[in-house]
Image: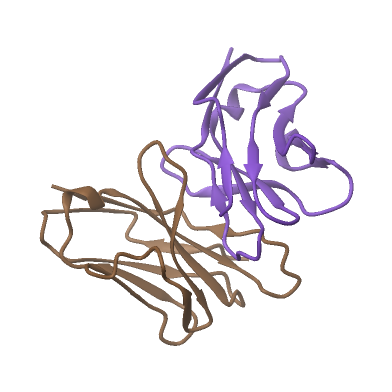
Amino acid sequence: EAGVVQSPRYKIIEKKQPVAFWCNPISGHNTLYWYLQNLGQGPELLIRYENEEAVDDSQLPKDRFSAERLKGVDSTLKIQPAELGDSAVYLCASKDRKGDTGELFFGEGSRLTVL
Amino acid sequence: AQSVAQPEDQVNVAEGNPLTVKCTYSVSGNPYLFWYVQYPNRGLQFLLKYITGDNLVKGSYGFEAEFNKSQTSFHLKKPSALVSDSALYFCAVRGGGADGLTFGKGTHLIIQP
């Protein structure tokens, strides 16, 4: 079974530029999460999707961050414009709602460096 | 609101010795508790979870964790450490009606040969 796939793995941009991250969850997993992991910290939830609906985006900084999951499968997280403080790892995770016991499956992450 | 505390930034253990990585939590209702491991430049990898039942949970790579409701703790343990266990370990909790996981800040485990 293929795991959660994220791209790009690494991205270096200058401040004020836009950037986008892509996530393909495990097949059949209808719950998808984007987490932010700052250096030396644990992951923090940005947004959660149930199929194509964003059911929890309370921690997403909506002035510059946006996300979509148009067909309820792949998802894209966008930052425009990027700031120096956005340098972090962006993790995507998915979960199967059937028999849900809470375990999330994570991708390798996308490491963003803003110069 | 739910929270997780990992009081040690780093734990150093000699290879072959037992190891413990500490975790305490705060959540309303019954908790779901998890341990994840993260190797450098990699995503989080699931180790084990407690949902209900036996307080001692066994997981991947010989790790186990003990749920203690009265102390609100879920410490990660292994009887004999390996150098390859060196990594960053995260404790996480789900509860209080929330769907996602709340993570601790992580503990660096360093196993010395």
Picture layout, residue B90 above or below residue A99: above
Q: Quadrant of residue B13?
A: top right
Q: Name the colouring of the figure.
A: by chain
Among all residues in the image, which is located at the extreme bottom?
A71
Q: Quadrant of residue B4?
A: top right
Residue at x-position 70% and y-position 33%: B76
Choose between B16 and B93: the one closer to the eye: B93
Horizontally, is B57 left or right of A60 in the view?
Answer: right
Kindly indicate which chain is depicted in brown in the rendered structure. Answer: A
Q: Position of residue B96 (x, y in %)?
A: 66, 60
Horizontally, is B77 left or right of A43 in the view?
Answer: right
Choose between B28 and A45: the one closer to the eye: B28
Residue at x-position 57% and y-position 62%: B100
Picture layout, residue B38 above or below residue A22: above
Picture layout, residue A90 above or below residue A49: above
Q: Colour of chain B?
A: purple
Q: Quadrant of residue A90?
A: bottom left
Residue at x-position 63% and y-position 66%: A1
